[in-house]
Each structure stands twice: as C-alpha cells, then as structure tokens.
Amino acid sequence: MALLDIKALTVEFATRRGVFVAVDNANISVEAGQIHGLVGESGAGKSTIGAAVMGLLEKPGRISQGEISLNGQPISGLDREAMQALRGKRVSMIFQDPLTSLNPLLTVGDQLAETIQFHLKLNDTDAYQKALELLTLVRIPDPEIRINQYPHQFSGGMRQRIVIALALCSEPDVIIADEPTTALDVSVQAQILSLIKELAREKQVGVILITHDMGVIADTTDVVTVMYQGKVVESGLTAQILGQPAHPYTQSLIAAVPRSHEKVRRFPLVSYGGKTQAFDIDDLARSWKKQTIDHTKPLFEVDSLTKRFITKPALLPSQQEFATAVDQVSFDIQQGEVFGVVGESGSGKSTLARMIAGLYQADGGRIVFDGTDITKSKDLSDYRRQIQMIFQDPYSSLNPRMRVDAIVGEPARHHKLLSGKALQMRVDELLDQVGLSAEAGKKYPHEFSGGQRQRISIARALATQPRFLICDEPTSALDVSIQAQILNILKDLQEHLNLTMLFISHDLPVIRQMCDRVGVMKSGVMVEQQATELLFTQPQHHYTQELLSFMPKLEGIRRVAS
Amino acid sequence: MLQNTLRSWLDSDFMWRLSRSPVAIISLLVVLLLVLGAIFAPWLAPYDPYDPATLDLMNGFTPPLTANDFTGQSFLFGSDDQGRDVLSTILHGMRVSLFVGVAAVAFAMVLGISLGLLAGYLGGWVDTLIMRIADIQLTFPSILVAMLIFGIAKGITPVEYRDQMAIWVLIIAIGLSDWVQFARVVRGATLVEKNREYVMAAQLIGQPKAIIMMRHILPNVLSPVLVIATISLALAIIAEATLSFLGVGAPPTQPSLGTLIRIGQGFMFSGEWWILLFPACTLLVLALSVNLLGDWLRDTLNPKLR
Amino acid sequence: MINYIFKRVAQSALVLLVVGFVAFSMFRFMGDPIDNMLGQERTEADVQRLRGELGLDLPFLVQYGRFLSDAVQGDFGVSYRQGRPVSEIIVERLPATLELAAVSATLAISLGIVLGVFTAIRRQGWLANLIMTSSLIGVSLPTFLIGILLIYVFSVNLGWLPSFGRGEVVQVGFWSTGLLTVSGWQALILPAITLGLYQMTLIMRLVRSEMLEVLRQDYIRFARARGLSERIVNFRHALKNTLVPVITVTGLQLGSIIAFAIITESVFQWPGLGLLFINAIQFVDIPVMAAYLMLISVIFVTINLLVDLLYVFIDPRLREGDK
C-alpha cells in the first residue's frame, strides 16, 4: 500500500468562460522515503495537485472526482476542521519563495516553537530544544544564536532551510515541495535539494517535488510523473523515464532541454501538441543590410568599467555609502561574436548589460564601440540606432496599453528611419518573419502567449536593423519548449545577419549552447574569461569550477532524435 | 472597426462584472440620474427659486403635498420660509454641489497625477521634495486644510468680490486638500512601472523623459486613479457640504446642498422637518451611490483585493 | 535607532517652523493689523506707536523670529473680535475639545479595530456583510448630518439628551471638566458618538482591507499549511502584521478627530476650540486662526512622532540600522 495515493483526481475551476479542468483524471502514488517528481510546463496542473492534497485549493477550484488517501484512509472530502488537523501533522508543504514564506514580525524560534507546541503538545523548554534540534538538522550554523533572530536577518537559502525545518516540526509523513529552489541560485539550489534528499531517506518521509526543471528531476527524484495540460502523460522510475521516454511529449520535452556536456548546432523542437510557428530567416536576411565582419578589430572594447549604487543617501558626498555592482570589468567583443556573461543573482551581470545599453551611467572606465567612447560621447543617437536589446520578461517588456504594431514600429519611428506607409509595411513584414501574421499588429500584447510576446520583442529589436544585440536572460521566464524555439531564432539571427551579441544568463547549459566566449562574474568582478568550450572543459578559477559542479547532470538522459 | 471595439468592450470582463452586480448598476443609474438632474436643473425645476418675481411669501412653510392655506398651491417636497419650492432648491443646490465636487476632484487629479509622475519617475531630490510636502500636508486633515485655505483666501480677497469668488475658492481649497492621495498612488504605480522592461525599451532608443512619462507610464497607472477619483468625488461632495454647512463655503447667492441643510437645521425644532429632511436625503443618496460605485470599482479593478 | 529618532524630531521641528511661517504670514499680509486693532478714530501718532509696539517696522525675518519666540512662550496676541489675549481664550476652550476628542477616539479606535478584524475574518458571513454595507452609509453620511440626526431623534423627539452645550462643569485647577458630573456626561454622549462614528467606519474599513491583504500573504498560507489553527493564524500571525500599517493611519485619524471636532462642536454648540476657530474664520479673526493652527500643529506633529516610534517598536526590520 502506498503512503499517499491519488486516484483519478479531477480538479475543476468554474470560470466565466466555462469550466476549466486544471487536473484531469490523474493517478499518482508516493511511497515512504521516496522523492516523487511532478514535472511539466506552465499550465500543466502540477501545483494544483499539490494544493488539492493539502486541501488548500483556491476558490473556485474544487475536486470534482477522484480520491486522495493517506495510509489507506481517504483524506479528500474531509471537512475543514478534519483537514486542518491533518495539515502539518501528516502532510506539510514547502513554498517557492522563502522570502515571503516566513512571518517577518516573529523570530524564527517563535515560529518553530509555536508549530511544535501546537502539534506535539510539549512544554516551552522542550519545544525550544526541539526547535534547536531542527535548526541543526537543516544545518543552520550557530543555532543557539540564530534561533532568536528575525527572518530578514537570514539569506534566501537559509530561509528556505528554516521553511523546511518548519515543515518538519510535526514529523509529517508527506511533504509537498512546490518549486522549492526556483527562486534560489544554482549553488544554493544544489544544497537545498541534497538536504531534501537526505531528510527523505533519514525520516522516511514521502516527498512530492513539483518542478519545471528537468535537471532537478534528474538529480533528485526517484520516481517521476510527467504532466501536460492537466493530464498525466507518463509515470515511472526517473532513470527509466528520462532514459527511455515512451510518450512523444516526454520525448520532445527532454529533447528540448539544453545540454551542458556538448554543444549542439540547433535545438530539437517540441512537436507535441500545437504547431511551432516558423521563423522566416531567409526572407529576413534578403532585405537586411548586412555588415561585413572585420576580424582585425573588436566591435566593443570595455575597459575597467565600474558602477556604484548609493545605498545610503546623504547630503554630504563623504557620508554617502555605496555598493559596487560592477567593479573594474574589462573585455572585448569581436565582430560577429556572441559574448556570454554568466553569474548568479547579484553578480552585476544585468547592471553591466544596462551600462552597455546606455541605460545606466558608468562611474568609471570606458566603453568603446567601433572606435568611439560612448561613455564620453554627448550624442548617443547614432550608437542607439545600432544597438537593440531583448529583455527577460515577455510580460513586462511590451507596453500593455500599446498596440503591437505601435510597439514594433516605435524604434524605427523614433530614429526617423521610416514613417507612414513604409513603416507600416516594414512592421507587417517583420511580424510575418518572426512567425506571427501581420494581423497580430492590430492586437494588444495580452492576447499573446509568452513565446509569442518574445517574438514580438525580437521583431521590435530588428526593426532598426541593428549591428549589436543585447540579450538579458532572454529565455529564463519561458518554458523549456518555447526556450528552444527562441534560442534557435537567436542563433539564426547571429549566423545569417552577422549580428554581434552580448548574451547574459544564469543558466550554464544555455550559455554553452549560445556563446563563443564567456565571462564569469561574481560580486561585480569578472573572475574568468575564456572561449566557451575551454571554459566548460578546463575551468581555471575555483568559482567557475564550483558553478560547473552544481550544474544538473543530464548526461544519463538519452538523446532522442527529433 | 468601431463596431468591433464596441463589441469587445461590451464583452470585456469589466462589463461582465458590472452586469453581475446589481448594487453597482443601481448606484450607477442613481448617479447618472442625479447628475442629469443637476445639469438640467434650470429646465427641470418646477420653479426658479432665486427669481424674486416668482416668489410668494404667502407660500411659506407649505408641508409636502398639501395645499397652502392661503394660495392653494402645493409642492412635492413642500416649501421653505420664503415660499420657495424645496424640490427646485434641491435641484439647483445639487448643481452647485456636483460642480464644486467634480471640479475640485479634476483639479486635485491633474495636480496629483503630474506631481506623482514626476516624483516617481525622476526620483532623487524632486521625489524627496514633493513627497515631503505631501507627508506634511497629510499630517493635517484635508477638511482642515480646505478650511484654512478658504479662510486665507477670504482674508485676501476684497469684501465686494467674496461672494463671486467663493465657489472658485471652494474648488481650489478642496482640490488642494486632496491632491496627495492621487500623487501617492500615481507615484507608487510609477515606481513599479518604471522598472518594467517596456520602459527600458523606450529608454534604450533614447526617448525623452517627457514622452516616456506621458505615452508609456501614464496610461498604465490610470486604473487606480479612477478608483481614487470616484472615492474622492464622494469625499469632495461631503467636504463641500460640510464647509457650506459651517458657513465657510458656498455663498448665500448660490446655495449648495450643505447650505440648504444649514438653513433647514434652523427649522428642525419648530416642526418644519421637510426643509431639512429632503436636502439631507439627497446629499446622502448622492454620496452613498458614488461611494458604492467607488467601492465596486476598487474591488473590480484591483482583483487581488477580492 | 537613535539616529532615526533624531531625524524624526528634526523633521517635526521643521514642519512646525513651516507652519509657524504660514501662521506668521497670515498675520503679516492678511489685512492690516493696525486697521483691525484701531477703530475709525485714530491719529497718526496712535498708528506709529502701535506700529512700534507691534514691531511692524522691523525687518521681516526679525519679525518672524519675534513671532516664533512669542508663540513658544504662549503669546499669540489679542483677538480682534473679543479683544482678549488669545492664549487666555485658548486655555479656557482647550479642555472641552480634548475631553470630547479623547472619548470619541477611544470609541472609534477600539470599535473600529474589533469590527475590522471581525469583518475580515468572517468575510463571507451575513453579519460581516451587513456591517460592511452599513459602514458605507457611515462613510457617506457627513459628520454634521449624523449630529443633526442624533439631535432630531434623541433631543427633539425623545427628549432624552441635551442638544447643545457641555452641561455642568467642575473647575479642577485651570481645567474645567465635564467628566465629573452626570449632566456633563449626558451632554457628552451625542457629540462623542457624532465625532467617533465617522472615524470608526474609516478605521474599520482600513483594518479590514489591511487584514485581507495580510491574509493573502505566503507566510499566512504557510502557517495554514503547517496546520496551525485558525485562531493562531488570525490573531497571532495576521493581526500583528495588520497593525503595522493601521497604526500609521490611525495616528492620522486622531488628527482628523481634532479637525472634525470643529464640525461637531459647531452642530452641538460645544464650547471648544473648534467652535472658536470656525467663528474666527467667519470673522477673519487672524490671531485666533494663527494660534489655533500652531496649537493643533504641535498636537499633530507629536502624534505622528509617537506613531513613528511605535512603528519601530513593532517592526523588527526597522529596529536596527538607520532606515
């Protein structure tokens, strides 16, 4: 008998436009001591399953069919009180964002002791002792001191450890971890995942690990269930599923995951369900005024570039305090090259990109573009015409109150390259080339999906026929299948249009697939610069080595022909 | 094209929610009715209450719907001490009340939105200066600020112009006391919007700050403004009534609902209840329906509050 | 922390200086004080003498300095209308307003918080919905209408309570209190309800919306997911977080109670500062207006300062560092 058994679960949301089935007839079972991965792209219904097990479905969601049982006893359909008694005691949950999961006004010790006392009926001293034990268990250093601190005094990774300690307070049988490491850096992610793994073994807890990340699945889980649009498409031992996926969706999903151990020329595209939109690079290349590549001199020379942010404003400059976001960074970008910058959050990589884009003023150093120093130059309009940028979040990079054709046409109109009919024709043509129709121009951004929006963003960037493209985490907000499409488009642009690119990412496998040379940043400093293949095979700096070691290993996954 | 726009608007979630909320529909209808009544008061009102030629002192103190003992005339809401038709005075009073309310909110809105946009987008000392002033003003309740501005203006204007200026002084006083709400909300929304990537995309191509603020940020910060504007309208109408009631608002030549209530209060003890009751009810219905509408708008446009 | 307090005190002092400047400008530029103080029959010598006495011939900044130092010593000049020192009038009127404000503030804050929490927790219940709907009527009813309504019902029709004045007062030192007599309390009931009701609805609605906001936070969902009871989640986790923003606005509301006292006092002919102020505006009695302005500014600024300090006490994130 399985510890947790979900049978034929169907969850429905009644909305204005009819009933939306978020989970459709799903069967999942979890054993004690086992980590069961629940993987799928956005909208797959994986988080809804977690909420259904906890009895925390948000209205108007309801379980319309099926049964959830724990140790053979049905727990779905219990009333509020019975469910509340079960929560925490038998099943517990870890949320995605550790920064918002803890009550900011209570000390960590208070929150632990309160939960312990509520469930285990211990006296104050015993509860305090137990809280200390838990902090030690999740490897918080100096627990005697830190137990009396408030959440804001801990780093993100430390807070997630405390969240795990809180979930363990009542010694539950099942823990549901909903994207527990998505908000964390890779190095912290690896530590948290190994902690969850050890605790599952040691305490014989069944864990449902909800994630969108195949790397996390491969590294952490014993069993995996793959979901697509509310349905379970495949379930089985992780090695089995990843090695020999039977279902075409699983096959295409795995194929689309960027590999870290080898460079492929193009990404295989997910062909399951829905058609992929074509990107017409040949048509685009025909009308493009291609720059010839001069290999003798670099396009960019960045020399000891520095940016400081004021952390404590004061009237007197001597009393101000600064944080150095970018510290004396130097590198060159050759013409026609893709230069990657990789680093964790707070490493200064986005600040660097924004300085090069002319959005932030540098506090020191030079950026020389094609012979002119743009940090000194008064009139940047010529430079601005030659560069463009693709942003991270397709939901925020398009003005929601502007029509798509106005958005795409804005750069060309602003630089007075085109106007009137000619501009409209160019916009229609571009939308067509990026795989949307000219009709798309008459709509507003909210009518498009994330991948389509990123295509609009690309069309906007191409409208001025730039020489240089800055990509700031262009795919980190996208599902893996969409990511593959967008990365292919960017590869096409670079190859056929002779574009030079600066590619910013935290994702090492993506960097390996996209870049010719890479710079590694840590706390504002560029610690290593190297040709991509060399960097991945022979990292020199110990930080680079560390980053590479945390990278999820996907070598075991069989490559499937697409 | 136009038809499509209209259809998509009628089909929008906004209209759908409106159609599902009887309270919102009723209050919207009541507000529309009162606004139309105020606009067309000179044509709708059965009498012109401020034309001495039509007044007959003999008609004084006629209770509602009863024939006057001397003249035999009868009035729906009765008549006041001067023999004026109470219904007509209400219609004209509402005209003054609504005009002052709408104009004051419009003034506060323009001022607040501009300052909020500047503070939020430019940041630095501009932000510090504007928000410090806002903070200081917020320390003082708006009704008091309005009274004070009214008092100062009264002190500055020559006696013979006081009555003519009173309405405009009232608008400025209420408007100036209320801009902080708008500025704070717009600044907050601007701080969020300016870090969005579409703003960065506009900065990237070198769009001037003014264009970025007007074309990109402004349209995206307007929906909370609509909510605040509706709630502010109710507050402004109440503020105007309060000031007029205290005798520091609308002049006797242009009585507003507040003035009418002030007059009616005098007859409360002597039994002529209708002179007080009907203007008071009108004011309550007006303020209540605008408030209900604002409340519904806030719930609808700010889905996370539901 | 000490730095923060120092900063706030300095800011408050700056606010008072600005208010002082406004009050002084009123004196200086609104009408001619000489005109106001001397009647029609005056000689050039009288004017000159008074000009010298009042210091009107001194440089502007010196006059401002003198005005401030006088104000700090409680000297606000002589009322144009009553011909008595303003400070004397204010000391006479102050107790009435403070007693009224204190009683209504207690009423408004305690009931407002209780009802706000109740309506937030029982969001779907019929009683909570009823309270919310009636609160909208409360917000739409101007204070003066509430007063008139109460007078009409309890004084005119039922004749239970007085419709104006303070009742019998007892002199305790310079303080005249109505809290020691039965008729004083009877006279206080209607004005206190009038003044408190509107503030109560505002506080209640604020507490409700803040609490709903807090109840949506991840840490509340997590507290539920840990199986903690509704009581602990609502009162231990949610309430404390709700109170942080509520305290600020409640502080501001205390300020409005004093401002709205003007209206209440006017309806009930309550012999307090508000009535004094409204009469001063009607008769352009500038020394009284200026003094009232300065006095309530001190009260407001003090309340705000206390609120900020309370904030630091509740929120650990503000406790260390300067911010």
Image (cartoon, coloured by chain):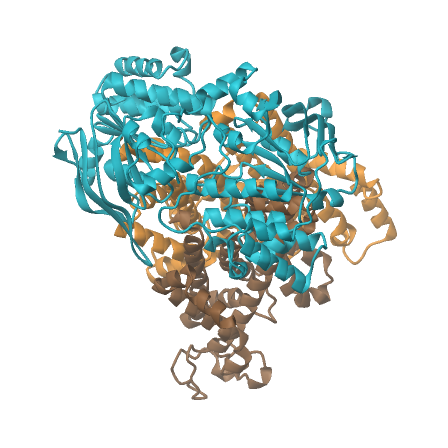
Q: Is residue B92 above or below residue A139?
A: below
- Expressed as whole percent of the image width and height from the top left, the position of residue B44 reads 50, 81
Quarter of the figure that contains the C terminus of chain C: top right
Q: Residue at image x 24%, y 18%?
A: A203
Chain C's colour is orange
Q: Nearer the viewer, residue A343 or A396?
A: A343
- Expressed as whole percent of the image width and height from the top left, the position of residue C85 reads 66, 43
* Residue C286 visible in rendering: yes
Q: Nearer the viewer, residue C275 or A455?
A: A455
- Expressed as whole percent of the image width and height from the top left, the position of residue A317 reads 72, 25
Q: Nearer the viewer, residue C247 or A53?
A: A53
Which chain is tinted cyan? Answer: A
Chain B's colour is brown
- Residue situated furthest right in the rendering: C44
Quarter of the figure that contains the N terminus of chain C: top right
Q: Is residue A238 left or right of residue A326?
A: left
Q: How many marks?
A: 0
- Residue situated furthest front in the rendering: A561
Q: Is residue A375 above or below residue A65?
A: above
Q: Nearer the viewer, residue A14 or B233?
A: A14
- Expressed as whole percent of the image width and height from the top left, the position of residue B180 reads 58, 48
Q: Is residue B277 above or below residue C308?
A: below
Q: Residue at image x 41%, y 80%?
A: B76
Write down the quadrant of residue A5 in the picture: top left
